[in-house]
Amino acid sequence: MSGAEAARSRRHGAGGAARRRGRATGVALAAGAPGRSSRRAAAALLLALVTALVGLVGLVAAAGPAAAHARLESTAPAAGEGLPTAPPEVVADFSEPVSLAPRGLTVVDAEGRSVTAGDPQVDPQDATRITVPLAADLPPGTYLVSYRIVSADSHPITDGWSFSVGTVRPGGLVDPGADDMGTPYSGPAAVVRGVAYLGLVAGLGVAAFVVLCWPGGRSRTTERVVTVGLGTVIVAAVAQLLVQGLAVSGLPAGQLLSGDVLRAGAEGPVGQAIALRLGAAAVLVAVLPWALHSTERRVSREVAAVCVLAAGALAVSFGMAGHPRAEHPLVLALASDALHLLAMAVWLGGLATLAVVALRPPRVEGASPVEAVRRFSTVALGCVAVLAVTGSWQGWLQVRSVAALTDTTYGRLLLIKVALVAGIVLVAAGSRALVRRRIPARPPVVALAGPGTVADPRPGVLALRRAVGVELAGALVVLAVTAALVGMTPARAAYAPVADASVDLGGGRVAQVRLDPARPGPAQLVVTVLGPDGRPEPAEHMHADLTLAAKGLGPLTVRMDGTGEDSRWASSGLQLPSAGEWELDFTVGFDEYDEITAEARLSVE
C-alpha cells in the first residue's frame, strides 16, 4: 500500500469512528431537547385532557348532586325512649337523601324476631325519611332498630337504636356520631382502591412519562408494564363491584359471587362508575400499549385523542363513586378529583420509571435519559402544582373547619398526608436543584457500552437516584393514606361539636352543662353540680326543658336521669330538631327546701 493510500485509509478510519461516535451520541440524545415543539405538545395534551374532563363531568352532572355520608338526625320512637303503648310505625330521618339497601330498616324484639308488618319505604315526598310499619299490639319489651342505607357517595352505612314498650328499662343509641360510623367492608374496600391507584400509576403514569419525557424509552418492557397496570385497574374494578355488593346486601362473604351480591354492587353510582371505568380501561388496553410500541416517533392525532378521552373517563370514574359525587358544584368537584388523580399518576409513574429503569447504573436501556430527567423535572413541578391546588380544594370540601380538621380521624389522617406530601416536595425540590446543577443538558461524549445500551458518564446520577427513591417511597405511603381517606366519613360529617356552659347557682355552687354533640339529631345533655369547694355536690332531682325561640320550638321536656353519681345528671332520648341558639331552663333540687332554677344558652350548629 502506498503512503497516500495509507493516509487515505487512516482518514477514512478516523472519519468512520467519528461517524460511529456521532451515531452513538445521536442514539443517546434521541429523546431530544425540550424545545418549543415539545412544550407545545405537552401544553396541547394538557388542554385536550382538561377539555375532555370538563365534557365528561358535564355529562355525569346530569345525574344531579347530593350530599355525602348521611347522618341519622331524628327517630320516632326516639333513641332510648320508653313508651306506654306500642307505636304503629318506626320513622328515621336522615340529614340527606338516602337509598335503602336490602333489609334496609329492621325492627326485632329481644329474641331477634322481626316485629315489622311490611317492607321499609323511602318517603316519595322526602328522600331523607324512611318508615316501616310495626305489627299491632307489641308486648312490653325492648326493641332494636337497625338500618342499612347507601349515602349519595356510594358508601353503605349501618347503625341503629333501641326503644322500649311498657315498664322496661330503655336501651340506648348505638353511637351514630362516631368517626367509624358503620361502613361494612371498609378495610377490603380501601385495599381494592389502593390496588386500583397502583394500576393507574403503572398504566397511565409510565405511559405519560415515556410520551412526554422519554420517547427513546419505548420498548416491549414499557408496553408490558402499561398493559399490566391497566389490567390491574380492570381487576380492581371488578373486585370493588363485589365488595360493594357484599356491603350493600349484608350477605356473608361466602356468597361473594351470588346474583344478589352482583345486583347490589351494580346498582347506583358505583355500578355506573365501574361500567365507565371498565370501558375506558378496555379502550386504553387496546390502544395505548400499541401506540407506545409503535416505531413511529409521533402518534396520530386520532389515536392521541382516543387515549386522552379514555384517560379522562378513567379518572372521572373514581370520583363518581366517592366523595366528589356528593359535592356542590358537581362538575368542579369531579374535574378537580380527576385532575388530582392524573397528576398523582403522572408524578408517581415518572418517579417509578426513573428509579427502576431510566437511572439504572451503569447502563441505560435504549437511549440516554439525560433529557428525560430534565424534562421530568419540569413535568413533576407541574404535577405538584396541580396536586396542591386540587388537594386544597378537596380538603376544604371535606373538612370546612379547623375543629373538624383536628378533632376527627379523617382530619388527623389528612394532616399526616399533607405533612408527608410537604416532605416529598422538599426532597423533589432538592432533586430539581441537583438536576440543574450537576447533570448537564448535553453530556460530552457517550460511548457504546454494548448492544442496545449506552454508558452513563454523567455526574450526580447516583445522588439523584437516591433522592428519587425517597420520593417514590414517600409517595407510595401517601397513596395508601389516600386510599384509606376515600372510604372514611369526611371530617365535616364526622365532626361532632360540643356546647359547654357554666351556670352560677348561688352560694358558691356551679352547674357545668355539656351538650354532645351540639348539632341536630340525637344528642346527650349532661349537667354536673359542683359545690363551693369545687367537688361534686349531690342533688335529689333535676328537671329541664329546651326552647328555640327564634323558630318557635319548645319548650321541649328533657328527661334527666341520675348516672349513679348524685351530682351528675344525663338526658335520655334527647333529639334536637333544628340548629340555633337553644335556651336550657333547668331546676336542681338538693332537698325539699333547697331548689334552684337556672338557665343556660347552648349553640347548636
Image (cartoon, rainbow, N blue to C red):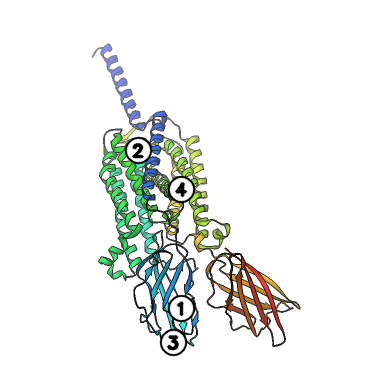
x and y percentages locating residue 361 in the rendered image: 38, 41
Residue 461 found in image quarter: top left
- 149 above or below 163? above
x and y percentages locating residue 478 in the rendered image: 45, 53
Q: Are marks 4 and 1 in contact (CB under 8 Å)?
A: no
- Return the residue at label 4: 471
Mark sitting earlier along the chain (4/3): 3
Mark sitting earlier along the chain (4/1): 1
Mark sitting earlier along the chain (2/4): 2
- Return the residue at label 2: 211
Element type where label 2 sits in the image: helix
Label 4, label 3: how many angstroms apart (C-alpha)?
64 Å
Three-letter amino acid code at the position of disc 4: Glu
Label 3, label 2: how many angstroms apart (C-alpha)?
72 Å
Residue at horizontal 40 percent and vertical 82 percent from the top: 109
- Return the residue at label 1: 162
Q: Nearer the viewer, mark 1 or mark 3?
A: 3
Q: Quadrant of the C terminus?
A: bottom right
- Return the residue at label 3: 140
Element type where label 4 sits in the image: helix
Observer-nearest of 185 and 346: 185
Residue at horizontal 49 percent and vertical 72 percent from the top: 175
Residue 538 found in image quarter: bottom right
Outermost right residue: 507
Pointer 4 local density, CA inside 10 Å: few below 14, some 14–19, many at least 20: many
Element type where label 1 sits in the image: strand
x and y percentages locating residue 354 in the rendered image: 39, 43
Three-letter amino acid code at the position of disc 3: Pro
Three-letter amino acid code at the position of disc 1: Ser
Q: Nearer the viewer, mark 3 or mark 2?
A: 3
Q: Nearer the viewer, mark 2 or mark 4?
A: 2
